Image (cartoon, rainbow, N blue to C red):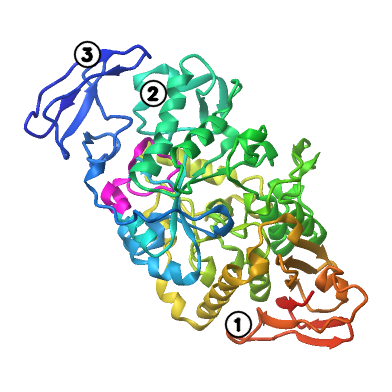
Amino acid sequence: MLLESGRHRGSTTALAPLSDGTFGGLVGGVTAGDRYRYRLDGRDALLPDPAARFQPDGVRGPSEVIDPASFRWSDAGWSGVPLEDLVLYELHVGAFSERGTFAGVTERLPYLRDLGVSAIELMPVADFPGERNWGYDGVALFAPARCYGRPDDLRRLVDAAHRVGIAVHLDVVYNHLGPDGAALPSFSPHYFSSRHGTPWGQAVNLDSEHSEVVRELLIDNALHWTHEYHLDGLRLDATHALMDDGPQHFLAELSARMHASFPSRKVLLVAEDHRNLARLVTPEESGGWGVDAVWADDFHHLVRRHLAGDHEGYFADFSGSLADIATTIEQGWFYVGQRAPHSGEHRGSDPRGLPPRRFVFCLQNHDQVGNRALGERLHQQIDAGAYRAASAVLLFVPETPLLFMGQEWGASTPFLYFTDHGARLGEAIRKGRRREFERFSAFADRRKRERIPDPQALSTFLASKLVWSEIEQDTHRATLSLYRTLLALRRTEPALRSSRREDSAAVALDEETLLVRRTARDGRGLVLVARLCGSGTIDIRGPDLDGGSSGARSAPPPQVLLTTEDAEFSADPSPPRITAAGDALRIEFTRPAAVILAAVA
C-alpha cells in the first residue's frame, strides 16, 4: 500500500496474507483525507482500493481515507418507514435537479414531502467512469460518485430526509461490475464465476471456490450503505442474475444478515426480478429467501399494452386486457406458472398468501422509460385523460406504488440512456444502442435508428434533466394536484391503508372499464371505477359497489369523492355524469377518467 498524501506521503506498507486468503495490515499515522493506492506483486501500476469509501479524482485515481464517524447525525429517533406505508419515488441524482447533486435532491425534499411520497429511491450512486451514467456501470461499490458530491453530502441528504419524514432507499448492483475501470478483478480471479454468465458478462462468484469472500464483500457493502449512511432500504438490481446453486441462496443470507443487523429500525430489501418467484418474498422461516418486496412488472406491461399498444418484445406475452389487469391486481402478478407465448417458457409461481404490499407496481420507471429508443414517458404517448385514470388506478390498488421522477406533473422531458465512457467503449455503446432497436418495427429503417440520441453526447444527458419551472404551468400543475390528492387519500383513508389481500377486489366491468374495491376493517369501503379508453356508459349494481355486504337491504347511494376530470385536476375538465337509481349507479364517461366513490357497507 502506498500513501500518496498526508504526513507520511510516499511511505509503503506490505500487506500480509490472512487465513481466509485475503491480505491485510495496519498502517499507522493515517488520517481522514489522506490518499492511497495499492501496488500488486511488485508491478508498476497503482490501483485504487476496490472497497474505498471515496474516489475524489475518479475510479482510477487514488482512494481517500474517510472517517464515517465524524458526521453529526440528527435522526436518533428515526425508526424507518414500514412496508405497509411505503410509496416509492425513484430518481436519478444527476437528472433530478439542475445542480445534479445530492445537495440538489436535498433542496427538493420539502416538495417531495408535500407530494406525499414516503421514500425516495436513488438510482445507483456507486462511482463509475466519467461524469454521467445511469449508475449501472458502477465499479467502486463503496464510494458515492464524486460528481454527485462527497460522502457527507449523501449523509446530509439522508439526515434531512429523515427530518421531514421521508425514507431513503438506494439501488445497488451486485450481479455485475461496469465494463470499464473496475479494479476488483485485478486483485483476484475468484470474484467472478467460471460456471455462470449474465447478459453483462461473467456472473459474480456466489457458489464456487472462494465464494465465501465474495459473498461477504457484497453483504458488507449492503451493511456499509445502511449503517454508515443510515439508508432505509436497498433495491437489488436484477436479482435473477445473482446465480447461486449453493445450500443457502445469497439472497437468503443477505436478507437474514440485514434484518438481524437492524433490530430497532425498519430497513427493507426490494428486488428487481422478472421470474415472479414467490420464494423470493416469502419469509425465511417459511422456506423463502426473506426479501421484503419485489418489482412486479406484469402490471406495468399489461397497462402499457392496453393504453399505448406496445406489443413487441416482452410485451408480446401480455394481452393488455382489463380482465388480465384485474387478475394481476388481485394476485400481485399475472404469470403464476403458465406458459408465456413470447418466451415459450413457463413463468411464475403461485403468490397466494403473500400480502399485496410485497409487490411493487408502477406505470413508469427508469427502465421502462429510458430503455425506449427516444426515452418517451407514458403520458407523452397516450390520451391525457387515460393517463390521469391510470394514475388513479396505480395509487388506489393495494400493492406498493412506485413513481418515477416527474411523472407526478407529466414532465415534458424524456429520460434517455446516457454514458460517459472513453472513445473506444463509447463508440461500441453508441453502435450497440442503435443495433438493439433493429428488431423493432419503428426502427427497422436505418435512417430512423440514426436519430436515436447518442448515449455518449452531453446533450443526451442534459435533455433528461427535469425542468422544475413546468410545475407552474396549468396542465402540469393540475396533474400534480391530482397526484397530491390521490396520495393524501392513500395515506388517510382506512380502506386504502389496509394491507390484507382479502380487503380488495378488482373486476373488469367491460373491455374498457375497471372496478377496484377496497374495504376497511370496519366494513366501510372505497370503490374506483376507471374508464381507460374512449367514452361509454356503465351501470354498476349494489353488489359491485359493496361486495354484496349490504345483502337484501337498500344501501344509500355512494358519495363521489373525486373524479380525475374535476377542474382541479384537468386543464380542460370533462367530468363523467353520475346518476343513481335504486341500488344501481350509472356513470356516463365522455372520455377516459376515473371516479372514486365512498361506498357504505
Residue 113 picture quarter: bottom left
Q: Nearer the viewer, residue 86 or 379?
A: 86
Earlier sequence position, callout 1 versus callout 2 = 2
Using the numbered discs, state the Cα–Cα distance from disc 1 to disc 2 in whole angstroms. Answer: 54 Å
- Give the x, y percent position of residue 370: 53, 53
Residue indicated by mark 3: 42
Q: Is residue 587 left or right of residue 30?
A: right
Residue indicated by mark 2: 185
Secondary structure under tag 2 reads: helix
Identify residue type, mark 3: Gly
Q: Nearer the viewer, residue 425 or 240?
A: 240
Secondary structure under tag 1 reads: loop
Q: Which residues are magenta?
A: 131-155
Q: Looking at the image, which residue is at 57% across and 63% down?
A: 377
Which label was assigned to residue 570?
Answer: 1
The quarter of the rendered structure image containing the C terminus is: bottom right
One can see residue 288 in this view: no
Q: Nearer the viewer, residue 426 or 294?
A: 294
